[in-house]
Amino acid sequence: MIEALSPRNNAATVWYFLQSQVAMHLPFGIVRALAARCMFGKLGSGVYFGFGCSYVKAANIEIGSHSYINCGVHLDGRGGRLRIGRNVDLAQQVTIWTLDHDPHDDFHRPRGREVTIEDYVWIGSRATILPGVTIGRGAVVATQSVVTRDVAPMSIVAGVPARPIGVRRSGLKYTLTYRPGIF
């Protein structure tokens, strides 16, 4: 308890709040990207952060070049590395978790597992990615799906829990460069 009240911890808490909450609610994408660059473990060029994104333990989060992190996305790095590849499109209000609790543990202990999202993945609005998942290159996760296990490259998954419903037939030759006006 004493450590939680130490001046060093309080300063870190204030810095985190300013970076992840205040900066991510400013109306300029460039400011949000600059704030993220100060916090994230690795951040490629041309990454866009939409208004109202949030993240926890950003030092464990890596995002590749030209990825698009839309409004209201939540990224969790508390349970281990969260790797997001290049040209990844995370639609509005996507949630990615690296930490959960073991439902069989008598003491409700947390358990952390890495999450990897490979290049050219497209995740639809309000989808949830759970700890320990790898989403393969070029895969698509449908809106409001819950991904509980690995997703094969180029597959399209949907549902709760997410299951394969198709195969993507794209050459994946694009670069995500769209940036909305002031936001």
Image (spheres, rainbow, N blue to C red):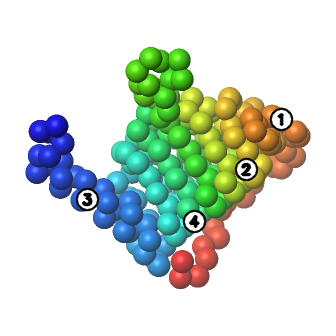
For label 4, the SS is: loop
Q: Give the residue at mark 3.
A: 15
Measured Cα–Cα span from mark 1 to mark 2: 14 Å
Residue at the spot x=62%, y=41% of the render? 129
Among the 4 quarters of the image, the one containing residue 25: bottom left
Give amino acid for label 2: Gln
Measured Cα–Cα span from mark 2 to mark 4: 15 Å
Give amino acid for label 1: Pro
- Tag 1: Cα neighbours inside 10 Å, few (<14), some, or many (≥20)? some
Residue at the spot x=47%, y=44% of the render? 76
Q: Give the residue at mark 2.
A: 144
Question: Residue 71 got which mark?
Answer: 4
- Closer to the observer: label 1 or label 2? 2
Mark 2 / mark 3, whichever is N-terminal: 3
- Closer to the observer: label 2 or label 4? 2
For label 2, the SS is: loop
On screen, residue 143 versus residue 79, left or right, reads: right
Q: Give the residue at mark 1.
A: 164
Mark 1 / mark 3, whichever is N-terminal: 3
**Residue 168 seen by the camera:** yes
Mark 2 / mark 4, whichever is N-terminal: 4
- Tag 3: Cα neighbours inside 10 Å, few (<14), some, or many (≥20)? few
For label 1, the SS is: strand
On screen, residue 8 versus residue 88, left or right, reads: left
